[in-house]
Every structure is written in structure tokens, then in C-alpha cells.
Amino acid sequence: MLGTGRVLADHLTGESLLIRTDFSDDAAWREVALAAMAPVDQGDDMQFEAVLTCIDNSDHDGWSIEQLLLALGDPPPYYIFVADTETVQNHEHPIVVVETADDDPERPRGKTFRVVPSEMWSIENNLSLANMDFDDFADSVDADGVFRGFPEPAQPVASVTTRDVAGWIAGHLHTDALRRFHREIDGWKYPYPIQLFEPEMADVHTQLLAADYDSRTDTELVGYDEFRKVAARGGPALHGSVPVHGAHWSFLLDVGSHRPLAAYRLEFLPPTDQQVHDGGADPSAVLEVPFISPEMVSLSSLTDDDDLVDREAVRRAVTAEAVRLHGPDMIGHVEPALRRIPRLEGFSIGCSVQIDGNPMFYVAVVTAVENEFIVREVPPEGLRVVAASHA
């Protein structure tokens, strides 16, 4: 199990290697190797463990990472683990994780970080299955370069709704961005849930710098520079976000008074290369409607007491259109995707339809007239529902 006398060259394919390069303390090596392979309880009666092939061969005594890379040659393997002098002597026994894939300017071969044995399972399991890559872990090390697990996600300090936020900021719209933010969320028929967090604004500012939205050409920003300047001041704040049609808002509130500090809107622009059919954009891939609902709805928050569209009316409308296109004998089961449907003009509902035994998809758009819908069969290449003025 500890790999005594194993030859490195015999274990280069399909195995996760733990290579010993310090031979000063046999007991410490055994402690490190066994701790790295020990099952770790993850709750709900689940255990995970690192599946390692240990290489304990004194020929590697004192070897550097560069010497190991030369001995490995071309990949595979694409990563290795190394127990060196620091691993043996440090009370935490941090094991070296080495990137051994082909050299790349952005990901140089031989890049390293360390991991405590209790977190080896996470790295070995995910790297061996290619669920995650080297940088996913390397970017999450502590200040001393050791991976001790991913940080616990921040917990919200309050759960509110768009109705609450719109009311708090209504009397303090001192910027164009805040005025637009209020205009886009005020008066929503179905209050949308929002979780508020209480970070240090300096941390929010750091995250914005890392996102580097300024350098991107596929985004449109409103109020971003102003928001970033406010966040740079530091101090506590309440931070939340709200999705809107085609974009989302991030906002900062004063912790005590809930007065708005800043807000910015981020929209990811659609790709410029439109699908081409017979020399032009395929008209079947776009459904133009006179209206699109700008309101976001938390479908899981809807109850039978809310103002809802009659689901059976949607089924009847879609069935009628399918019959018109394919004939009554071809139509099987028709099923709207949503159990509860908000009554919002311009809201789109997907429906599955069995046509001659094969699944097809339809979209029904809610109109201002009760139980009347705009219905279209979705072509194989998909369908975009757009307001006529945005087509």
C-alpha cells in the first residue's frame, strides 16, 4: 500500500501518484501517506477517499520538482502529488500538488501548490475524473499556498423582496442608475425574493476588479464606475442582486437605514453572428410579439392564491394550434411545462406535445385577453421570443 520499492516508470498511466522524495523519517512518511488515503466522512453516511499509488523508492531521495518532471516525460500523468521535506517536517504535512500537463504560457508545467492530507480526496477525485482542473484548487489556497478546502459560502443576513427594496430606495434616487433600477423593479405584480448579504465593500470592490467587466465587449454596463467608486470606500454594507429581463442589477444599501448607496446593471449582449438560412436570418427561429413581460417571477414562490393563468386554457390553445398544423389524428399528449403560470402579459410558457409519437415543443405567450395566447411551434433550431421593436 505504501509503494515500497515501486518503480516510477511502471505507474505513469491511469494512476494518481504520491511520490516520496524525503527519506529522513519513515514514521512521518507512513503517517502522511495513510492520512492522505484515509476515508473522510462527508455526512449523510457518505465517505470519500483519495485513490493513490504510492511510490516509495529511495532513488528519488532529495529530488526536485524539475527532476521529477524530467523522469515523467510527456504526459500522462497530468498531475502528481509529492511528499517532500516540508511535507514530512511541517505539523500539517502539506503535500505538494504538481501540474504535469503539457507546457502552456497560461498554465506552465510544474506549477505547484500544497494540500493538507484531509483534503486530498477532493483534489484526487476531481482531477482524476476531470470534473475540475488544477487551477480550480490552486486559485483557492490560503495565503501560505496551502489548500485546506473551499471557503464556506457567505450566508445571507436577511431575505426580502423587490417590493421591500423598491420602497427603501424610492425617496433616495440620487443617480441615473438608481432611478433606472427603481423604475425597472417598482410595481412588480409578484414580489421577487432577494437575499441580502453583509460583506465588506472592499471585498465587493476586489471581486469587481477580478471580473474585469471593463475589458469585455460582450457586456453593457450602467452605473458600474459609480458603483465601483462607492465600493472602494470600504466599510460594511448590505449587498443584493435582482435579475431583470436580459440583465441583472447589483446594489448596495446602508446597513442601518437601508438607504441606497449605489447600483449597477450588467447585461450580456447577444452574439452578433445570427443563424443564417438561405442567405439571411432564419425567420422561423424568431417569434415577434407586441409585448414582452419585463417582470421576473419566482415560480417556486407562486401559490394557488396568486393570480394565475388557467393551465387547461393553455393546453387547449396549444392543442388547437398543433391540430391546425398536423391534423387531429397526429396529436397526442399536450403538457404545459409550468404547474402555476403567472398572469403577466408577454410571459412565455413552454409546452411539450406528442406528434405522431414524437416529442415537439410549443411556446404560448400570455396576452391581455383572458385565455387567449400567441402560440408557435418551436423549430428544431430553437426559438427566440422577442418584442417586435427588438427583432
Image (cartoon, rainbow, N blue to C red):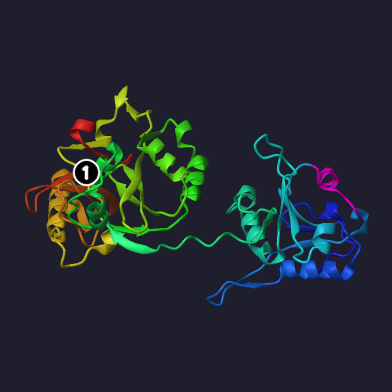
Which quadrant would residue 284 be assigned to in this image? top left
Secondary element type, mark 1? helix
- Residue lying furthest bottom in this view? 45
User: Bounds of the magenta span?
Assistant: 62-73
Q: Residue at x 64, y 54 (%)?
A: 141
Give the position of the N terminus as an image quadrant: bottom right
Please indicate whether residue 59 sits to the left or right of residue 123 in the image: right
Q: Residue at x 49, y 48 (%)?
A: 202
Is 348 one of the magenta-colored residues? Answer: no
Residue to which mark 1 is pinned: 183
Residue 337 visible in the displayed image: no
Task: In the rendered view, tell whether residue 32 sits above or below residue 66.
Answer: below
Which quadrant would residue 245 be assigned to in this image? top left
Q: Residue at x 32, y 22 (%)?
A: 279
Residue 153 visible in the displayed image: yes
Categorize mark 1 by other alpha carbons within 10 Å: few (<14), some (14-19), many (20+): few
Q: Residue at x 31, y 57 (%)?
A: 257
